[in-house]
Image (cartoon, rainbow, N blue to C red):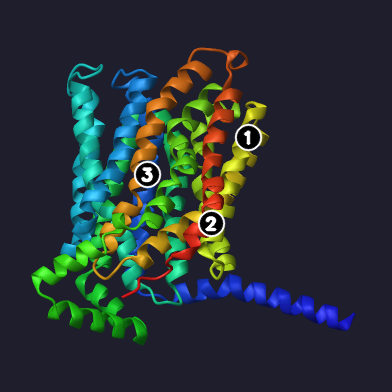
């Protein structure tokens, strides 16, 4: 009995150490990394706060129907991912700090244009208000196309091998904490000043984000973070710089072409098979806001922003904990398990609108997301060759572009046919809508499982020089 008791104590001790040590390591990380996290918190709050209201904004203020409003949301979300494909390399050329400042400034202009668009002329499809709103979205697209790769390139640069996994998980978690806060901020502001009033709050927060980067992520702080990295990291940086300086322009171009990620079939399969489960991400802003405000009555309907933004706060709590417990597990295995856990609970919504099944769906889906999404982002960053992190992150996110485009094309149709406006919940058929969405999402874990042997033969976990 004593031996069993000691074994249990050792097991608890090991689990506790696995859970706490990554947080301890991260806590002692550089001021530069904390500056990146603070910026990402503000940006998560602003981005998710606006995108969660965007479909309703286009309905009520720009005069578009559900299908066209869904396309506008898809234009922004898909456009951001496409922009990362083309603008991700900008980070590698101009540096992290400049990338942050330029991207946030462009987003400030875009968000301002979007907010004032209803006052610029007649509403309706392709009228003045609509055109100005699209110009605003274009600014957000360009800015975010630079911002997102810059954030993950910063984590790669400002962390050590001991803090890398938790660094990526915390960045992802903090962005989602920012994504939860609109659920608290938005309802009272929206009730007092309308959706445009909420948007003005986010314009101001974008200004705050610029100030944070300018003062906290100074040149001196960035350099100090690099200088304080581990000896192994510093030696690797010095070695890479020495090799890069010795290369001619022709050799650099040859290196870039040789390591271009689109040449790797396993890389392509791995990122594109994720499209199906990623549709659930897109439904967080394309479907859930209208589903919770139409198919429910009472508390859920009146506070739909809270439920729409519950996923981010759960990610903030779960992602670091799950990462701490699974950081030593095989990445591909975690992708299979995580995507299955994320996709399966969609079928709970087939039981019909109910606050308990809604909460269960959101919790289990988020647990699955916490199991695979931070690991995927870390994997893409770590297999990237030197000075190619930005372009790898951009291409790694390219399936997001297709996901957002495809999902936005059919989500409006599904809402109009299965969850239409001005129709009592009893006459809707949201059950069929979620059943189809569940089948789509399940393609990912089964696709990963079927390709496991082929994928594992040449599956990279680090960049090989």
| Residue at the disc numbered 3 | 400
The residues tagged by marks 1 and 2 sit, at their Cα atoms, a distance apart of 25 Å
Residue 127 drawn above or below residue 260: above
Q: Is residue 147 visible?
A: yes
Residue 227 drawn above or below residue 200: below
Q: Earlier in the sequence, mark 1 or mark 2?
A: 1
Q: Depth check: give the residue in front, 90 or 147.
A: 90
| Residue at the disc numbered 1 | 347
The residues tagged by marks 2 and 3 sit, at their Cα atoms, a distance apart of 22 Å
Q: Depth check: give the residue in front, 65 or 408.
A: 408
Residue 178 drawn above or below residue 423: below
Q: Earlier in the sequence, mark 1 or mark 3?
A: 1
Residue placed at 35% from the left, 87% from the top? Answer: 231
The residues tagged by marks 1 and 3 sit, at their Cα atoms, a distance apart of 23 Å
Q: Is the residue marked by circle 2 packed among few (<14), some (14-19), or many (20+) residues within 10 Å?
A: some
| Residue at the disc numbered 2 | 452
Residue 155 drawn above or below residue 59: below
Residue placed at 46% from the left, 52% from the top? Answer: 177
């Amino acid at each position: 009995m004593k031996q069993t008791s000691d074994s249990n104590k050792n097991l608890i001790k090991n689990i506790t150490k696995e859970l706490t040590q990554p947080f301890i390591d991260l806590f002692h990380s550089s001021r530069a990394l904390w500056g990146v996290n603070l910026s990402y918190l503000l940006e998560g709050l602003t981005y998710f706060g606006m995108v969660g209201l965007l479909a309703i904004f286009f309905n009520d203020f720009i005069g578009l129907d559900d299908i066209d409003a869904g396309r506008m949301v898809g234009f922004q979300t898909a456009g951001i991912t496409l922009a990362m494909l083309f603008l991700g390399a900008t980070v590698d050329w101009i540096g992290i700090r400049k990338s942050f400042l330029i991207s946030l400034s462009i987003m400030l202009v875009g968000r301002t244009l979007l907010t004032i668009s209803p006052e610029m002329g007649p509403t309706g499809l392709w009228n003045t208000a609509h055109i100005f709103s699209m110009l605003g979205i274009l600014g957000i697209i360009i800015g975010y196309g630079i911002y997102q790769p810059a954030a993950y390139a910063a984590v790669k640069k400002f962390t050590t091998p001991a803090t890398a996994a938790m660094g990526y998980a915390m960045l992802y978690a903090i962005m989602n904490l920012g994504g939860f806060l609109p659920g608290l901020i938005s309802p009272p502001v929206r009730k007092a000043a309308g959706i445009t009033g909420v948007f003005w709050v986010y314009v101001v927060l974008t200004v705050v984000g610029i100030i944070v980067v300018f003062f906290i992520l100074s040149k001196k702080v960035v350099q100090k973070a690099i200088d304080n990295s581990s000896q192994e990291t510093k030696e690797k940086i010095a070695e890479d710089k020495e090799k890069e300086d010795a290369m001619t322009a022709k050799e650099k171009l040859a290196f870039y072409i040789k390591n271009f990620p689109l040449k790797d079939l396993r890389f392509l399969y791995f990122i594109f098979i994720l499209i199906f489960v990623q549709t659930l991400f897109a439904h967080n802003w394309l479907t859930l806001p209208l589903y919770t405000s139409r198919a429910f009555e009472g508390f859920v309907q009146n506070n739909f922003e809270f439920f729409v933004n519950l996923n981010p706060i759960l990610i903030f709590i779960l992602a670091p904990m799950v990462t701490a417990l699974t950081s030593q597990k095989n990445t591909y295995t975690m992708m299979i398990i995580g995507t299955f856990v994320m996709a399966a609970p969609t079928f709970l919504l087939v039981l019909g609108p109910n606050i308990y099944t809604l909460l269960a769906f959101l919790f289990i889906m988020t647990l699955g997301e916490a199991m695979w999404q931070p690991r995927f982002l870390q994997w893409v960053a770590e297999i990237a060759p030197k000075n190619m992190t930005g372009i790898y992150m951009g291409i790694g996110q390219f399936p997001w572009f297709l996901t957002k485009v495809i999902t936005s094309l059919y989500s409006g149709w599904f809402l109009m046919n299965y969850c239409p406006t001005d129709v009592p919940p009893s006459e809707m058929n949201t059950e069929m809508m979620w059943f189809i969405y569940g089948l789509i999402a399940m393609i990912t874990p089964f696709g990963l499982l079927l390709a496991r042997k082929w994928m594992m033969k040449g599956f990279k976990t680090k960049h090989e020089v």
